[in-house]
Amino acid sequence: MYLVFGIAVAGIATAAYAWLSNEDQSAMNSYHSSSRQLAREVAERQGQLNSYKQANRATQDFYRHIKLHYNSVLTANNCYKFYDVQKQMLTMLSARIDIQIKQIIELKKQRDEASGSVKAQIREQLNAVRESLKQAKNERSNIKQQKEALFSELRDINHKTRELKLYLRDHCGQKGRDWYQRGLERRSA
């Protein structure tokens, strides 16, 4: 199962976020860049985790398996950190959406009180704010989907890392059993 959540946003990342402040635009661009980078890392790690059992030279591959376990833990940690970034991006977008809704309400009040060319200008502003609200809601929806996909990937990597840990214990002789036991001791300390 490869849910490459970073690729889906490639087109979105290049779009201008005119409805965001410069700081928020920078955060959004950074988010999309990090998303693509993490997607590549997750795909690579998933491939490695899916193929480690193919070699039947368990004791010869002990150190390679240890390195894979370590890298898998790092990848899972990166996924978890990025999961927090996604939560922050959703909070930022929700705040932006709230501001835009308030702007729409205020513009509607002004439009109802205005007349003539002023009313037409307010309608144009209202249409522009509505369009940016639509974009913000779409972006929030995309990030929610990516967040769900990332959570699924995180769970899958954690599960496969656990399987690798047990594989090391059961198939890599005394070195594997010793390594596993040291890990248990570190966790209980």
Image (cartoon, rainbow, N blue to C red):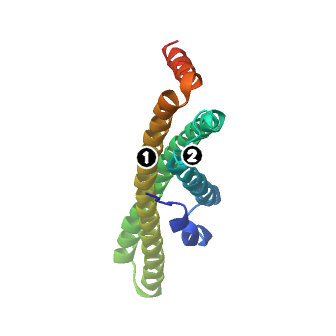
Q: Mark 1 points at which residue?
A: 156
Q: Is residue 60 above or below residue 125?
A: above
Chain-order first, disc 1 or disc 2: 2
Question: Looking at the figure, which quarter contains the N terminus?
Answer: bottom left
Q: Is residue 64 above or below residue 183?
A: below
Q: Where is residue 135 in the image (x, y as percent from the top left)?
A: 46, 70
Q: Determine the residue positioned at 65% across, 33% down.
A: 63
Q: Name the residue under label 2.
A: 55
- Give the residue furthest to the front: 56
Viewed as shown, does residue 172 lie left or right of 119?
Answer: right
Please identify the quarter of the rendering in which residue 14 is found: bottom right
Residue 182 vs residue 150, the one in the foreground: 182
Residue 60 marker: none
**Which secondary structure, mark 2?**
loop
Viewed as shown, does residue 63 lie left or right of 184?
Answer: right
Q: Position of residue 18 (x, y in %)?
A: 58, 69
Q: Determine the residue positioned at 52% across, 12% down.
A: 189
Q: Is residue 18 visible?
A: no
